[in-house]
Image (spheres, helix red, strand yellow):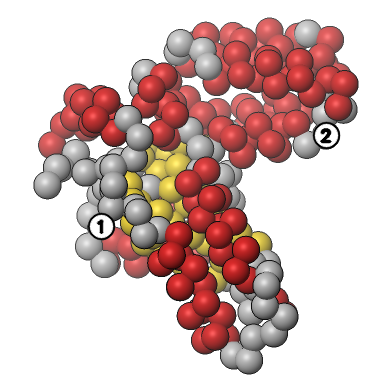
């Protein structure tokens, strides 16, 4: 399951803040679980979202990938206590390099790639410490703080081999969907009612997801890992 928060996707604040949830099912196909609107996000808000998803029949989530949303970990632990919570590494990289000067960007990205590309969590932690002690790391000391603040949501990645990590380390699939929605929204100058926005977004989602019945790339390799790791919780068919 992947969750992404999207700000101001509608004109005139018809959508001030929208959150999309995407599910990758046991057969590898994808499905948009819903879109939720709120001016404020936090543990209580996300708990209500997960309670709704559970009430609609989703009894278990194996891995939840989110982009560092406030209160998300607590909400997941409340409703789905067995769920593995993985932060979006791509989102974390963007936040980490947002204030890095252009001349240092390439080297910083190389160092960070070494961290999330490590063989295991211990090696990743050592590489983070090595980076923090370097001249570059000292210049951008906030990067270490940023990674450590989310470390518990970074390390689940290292439970899997590289080919599976590529499936779970980012919310890019939702970001691609968001781009499709924005492309439709920005061509409209006015919406007469909120319902008109809802209908337009619904049609944009339907059009963007028409091929989602196919399995995601490298799903067979991932299935073998999930069967071993999650046992009977990974239900096929």
Q: Residues within 10 Å of mark 2 (few under 14, many from 20)?
A: few
Left or right: where 131 falls relative to 102:
left
Residue plotted at (48% across, 16% down)? 121
Which image quadrant is residue 59 in?
A: bottom left
Furthest residue in direction bottom, as rendered: 192
Seen in the picture, residue 103 relative to 54 is either above or below; the reply is above
Question: On residue 99, which mark appears?
Answer: 2
Residue plotted at (70% across, 21% down)? 109
Q: From the viewer's side, name the closer residue of 198 and 51.
A: 198
- Asked whether residue 159 appears in the rendered view, the answer is no
Left or right: where 185 falls relative to 101:
left
Q: Secondary structure at mark 2?
A: loop
Q: CA distance from mark 2 to mark 1?
A: 40 Å
Q: From the viewer's side, name the closer residue of 81 and 35.
A: 35
Q: Secondary structure at mark 1?
A: loop
* Image position, residue 223 (x, y; %): 23, 31
Q: Residues within 10 Å of mark 1 (few under 14, many from 20)?
A: few
Mark 2 or mark 1: whose residue is earlier in sequence: 1
Which image quadrant is residue 145 in?
A: top right
Question: On residue 108, which mark appears?
Answer: none
* Image position, residue 50 (x, y; %): 38, 59
Residue plotted at (59% across, 90% down)? 193
Q: From the viewer's side, name the closer residue of 141 and 102.
A: 102
* Image position, residue 220 (x, y; %): 24, 30
Residue plotted at (62% across, 63% down)? 183
* Image position, residue 6 (x, y; %): 60, 59
Question: On residue 58, which mark appears?
Answer: 1
Which image quadrant is residue 209 in?
A: bottom left
- Asked whether residue 20 appears in the rendered view, the answer is yes
């Amino acid at each position: 399951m992947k969750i992404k928060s999207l700000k101001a996707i509608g004109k005139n604040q018809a959508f001030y803040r929208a959150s999309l949830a995407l599910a990758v099912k046991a057969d590898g196909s994808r499905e948009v679980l819903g879109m939720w609107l709120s001016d404020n996000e936090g543990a209580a808000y996300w708990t209500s979202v997960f309670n709704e998803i559970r009430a609609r029949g989703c009894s278990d989530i194996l891995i939840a990938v989110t982009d560092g949303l406030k209160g998300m970990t607590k909400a997941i632990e409340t409703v789905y206590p067995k769920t593995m919570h993985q932060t979006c590494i791509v989102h974390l990289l963007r936040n980490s390099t947002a204030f890095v000067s252009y001349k240092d960007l390439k080297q910083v990205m190389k160092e960070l790639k070494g961290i999330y590309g490590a063989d295991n969590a211990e090696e990743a932690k050592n590489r983070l410490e090595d980076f923090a002690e370097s001249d570059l790391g000292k210049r951008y000391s906030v990067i270490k703080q940023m990674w450590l603040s989310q470390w518990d949501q970074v390390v689940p990645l290292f439970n899997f081999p590289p080919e599976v990590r590529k499936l779970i380390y980012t919310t890019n699939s939702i970001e691609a969907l968001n781009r499709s929605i924005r492309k439709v929204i920005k061509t409209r100058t006015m919406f007469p009612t909120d319902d008109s926005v809802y209908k337009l977004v619904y049609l944009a989602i339907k059009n963007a997801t028409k091929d989602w019945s196919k399995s995601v790339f490298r799903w067979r390799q991932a299935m073998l890992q999930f069967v071993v790791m999650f046992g009977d919780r990974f239900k096929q068919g």
